Image: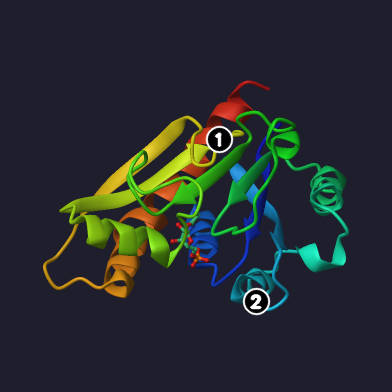
Amino acid sequence: MKTARIAVLVSGGGTNLGALIKAEREGKLKSGKIELVISNKADAYALQRAANAGIPTATVLKKECLTQEVFEDRIMALLSENKIDLIVLAGFMAILSERFTSAYPERIINVHPSLIPSFCGKGFYGLRVHEAALAYGVKVTGATVHFVNEVPDGGRIIMQKAVAIRENDTPETLQKRVMRLAEWQILPAAVEKVSAAMTANQ
Ligand code: GAR
């Protein structure tokens, strides 16, 4: 394997996907290449970002699948058709079962907007994570990139970056700062690190 073939799974705005595309263009992500973007939402702006960058896209909607198994089988079929080596969850808001995660041991990575093990697990996603951090009153938060296993946000940590909370932060201002200072920095770096390790072993 010369470069790892990467699929990015998205649901929303896709700013993390944007950071990965930029890193690839700038040569910072050089051991892997984004070959496919899969969304579980038809109107995700992330799909537009992928199309603008010339990356093939696919949409798999849960409501068009009778069961969770069918939903996951469709995604798995796309991954196998495209010979994907590494799966990156970048704001992918659908649950993946153990049947799915165990099929790709240490081959799925996720970015989470807090310092795991704080404010993570079931129910903690998107803005809710920042609302919880502000409600608790922590003075430092950040982002984590980790491998995905059967425990929600429980897989081995690859990279973390801390971000200071300000007195006047709202969930929205905090989310934006955590993205800019942490997520968009460590996600491309972690994807390069994992891709480099995967390709070195081939
Ligand atoms: C990001 O903040 C990401 O960390 C978070 O959703 C946002 C997606 O933004 N993911 C989770 O909360 C997963 N538990 P994006 O679509 O602009 O990349």
User: Closest to the observer: 162 or 83?
Assistant: 162
Specify which label sits upstream in the sequence, 1 or 2: 2
Q: Return the residue at label 1.
A: 151
The N terminus appears in which quarter of the rendering?
A: top right
* Coordinates of residue 188 in the picture (x, y in percent): 47, 50
User: Closest to the observer: 80 or 143?
Assistant: 143
User: Would residue 116 be visible to someone looking at this image?
Assistant: yes
The C terminus appears in which quarter of the rendering?
A: top right
* Coordinates of residue 189 in the picture (x, y in percent): 43, 45
**Relative to residue 173, is residue 106 depicted above or below?**
above
User: Would residue 59 be visible to someone looking at this image?
Assistant: no
Disc 2 secondary structure class? helix
What numbered label is drawn on residue 107? none
Label 2 is placed on what type of residue? Gln
Q: Is mark 1 within 8 Å of ligand 1?
A: no
Local crowd at mark 1 within 10 Å, few (<14), some, or many (≥20)?
A: few
Indicate left or right for 32 with 179 as reference. right
Identify the residue at horizontal 51%, vertical 48% (top origin).
122
What numbered label is drawn on residue 48? 2
Label 1 is placed on what type of residue? Val
Mark-to-mark CA distance, 1 and 2 = 31 Å
